[in-house]
């Protein structure tokens, strides 16, 4: 628009100069030699405006050149601004690789800071943002935190991304995917979701299904399985051999074996309990306390006394204390000593 105004003003000025010379100075014509090259005879007024026309063309070229440079710079600024917006979006989404090549120094500084920062949006922040890209992502994050299921495919986030994990957990909680669907395609889901799904599966699934996915067995899942043995609901029948196979898939501490014995004291029949912990204690020293707990809980004092008598002086002091109190006719719940 400014170039158009300049052109119109220049033509008006040149026209006035030419008209004035032709009307008031001279209407004659002259021929000029330019570096030995004869030029046609033209009016003095025309020869007078020729330098002005050349000057106009030169200034037009000058203005156009710097206008072009300015447009290139503006284009770089616009591209860098879009890259900055994308880097903010990636930071909010928790992307690990966020490498953007900024061309302008001011955006390069901001971009470097964002690329090496972790951003967490404030609650309801999306309402104060004018940029549509950022506003969309903020709303998406807010929905995920509120337990909603959103579409994340277009952002190409890995399965290990925190938002993807939470979004899949939201899908699972809403019933869009089942525990067995997750476990059968475990490579597509985060390990924490697989562990959660397996724990839920162990609350109701048959023993064959539990053993099928025992790769995901955790202590929480194990305790859910044990609680179902001879329970009132979702009862699970399991042999000692199958139970030992499950236990062997995990690294258990002495306290874990004791907790297992405590849980099984509710539902498992005495004979099976004794056989189970007798077998376990033979191959796992950590299970001896659980075996002692079982013996004392079932009032099997003779085998318990034999184990304590053959133990080291500082071993099983809690059970030795319990036995001493019992000999003094002091009856306490064995659970107080584990």
Image (cartoon, grey):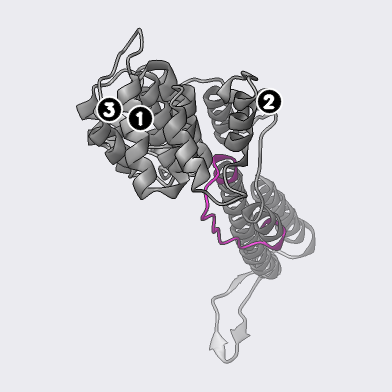
Magenta-colored segment: predominant secondary structure: loop
Mark 1 secondary-structure assignment: helix
Disc 3 target residue: 180
Residue located farthest toward the left when viewing the structure as drawn: 208
- Front label number (1 vs 2): 1
Give the x, y percent position of residue 59.
Answer: 68, 65
Indicate the position of residue 224 as horizontal and vertical percent values. Answer: 40, 24
Look at mark 1 in the image and give the residue it sits on. 274
Q: Callout 3 environment at 10 Å: few (<14), some (14 to 19), or many (20+)?
A: some
Crowd class of label 1 (few under 14; some 14 to 19; many from 20; radius 10 Å): some
Q: Please give the residue where the numbered disc 2 appears in the rendered image.
A: 123
Residue closer to the observer: 134 or 64: 134
User: Residue 107, labelled with which disc?
Assistant: none
CB within 8 Å, label 1 to label 3 = no
Task: Tell me what residue is drawn at x 58 percent, y 48 percent.
Answer: 87
Give the image location of residue 324, x and y in percent.
Answer: 63, 31
> Distance of mark 2 from mark 3, alpha carbons?
34 Å
Q: Residue at x 62, y 55 (%)?
A: 115
- Mark 1 vs mark 2, CA separation in Å: 56 Å
Residue at figure coordinates x 23%, y 22% from the top left: 206
Using the image, determine if residue 102 lies above or below residue 179: below
Q: Nearer the viewer, residue 270 or 77?
A: 270
Quadrant in which residue 192 is drawn: top left
């Amino acid at each position: 628009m400014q170039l158009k105004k300049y052109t119109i003003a220049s033509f008006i000025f040149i026209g006035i100069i030419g008209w004035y010379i032709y009307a008031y100075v001279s209407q004659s014509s002259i021929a000029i030699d330019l570096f030995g090259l004869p030029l046609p005879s033209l009016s003095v007024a025309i020869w007078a405006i020729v330098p002005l026309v050349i000057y106009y063309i030169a200034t037009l070229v000058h203005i156009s050149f710097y206008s072009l440079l300015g447009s290139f710079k503006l284009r770089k600024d616009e591209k860098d601004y879009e890259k900055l917006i994308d880097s903010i979006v990636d930071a909010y989404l928790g992307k690990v690789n966020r490498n953007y090549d900024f061309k302008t120094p001011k955006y390069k500084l901001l971009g470097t800071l964002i690329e090496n920062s972790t951003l967490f949006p404030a609650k309801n922040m999306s309402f104060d943002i004018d940029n549509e890209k950022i506003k969309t992502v903020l709303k998406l994050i807010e929905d995920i935190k509120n337990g909603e299921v959103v579409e994340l495919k277009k952002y190409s986030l890995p399965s290990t991304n925190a938002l993807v994990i939470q979004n899949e957990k939201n899908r699972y909680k809403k019933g869009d995917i089942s525990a067995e669907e997750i476990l059968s395609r475990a490579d597509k889901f985060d390990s924490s979701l697989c562990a959660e799904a397996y724990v839920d599966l162990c609350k109701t699934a048959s023993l064959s299904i539990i053993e099928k996915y025992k790769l995901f067995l955790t202590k929480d899942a194990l305790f859910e399985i044990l609680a179902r043995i001879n329970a009132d609901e979702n009862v699970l029948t399991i042999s000692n051999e199958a139970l030992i196979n499950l236990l062997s898939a995990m690294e258990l501490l002495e306290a874990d074996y004791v907790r297992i014995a405590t849980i099984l004291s509710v539902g498992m029949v005495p004979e099976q309990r004794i056989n189970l912990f007798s077998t376990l204690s033979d191959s796992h020293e950590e299970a001896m306390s659980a075996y002692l707990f079982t013996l004392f809980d079932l009032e099997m004092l003779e085998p318990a006394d034999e184990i304590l008598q053959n133990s080291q002086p500082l071993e099983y002091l809690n059970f030795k204390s319990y036995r001493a109190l019992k000999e003094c006719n002091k009856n306490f719940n064995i659970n107080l000593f584990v």
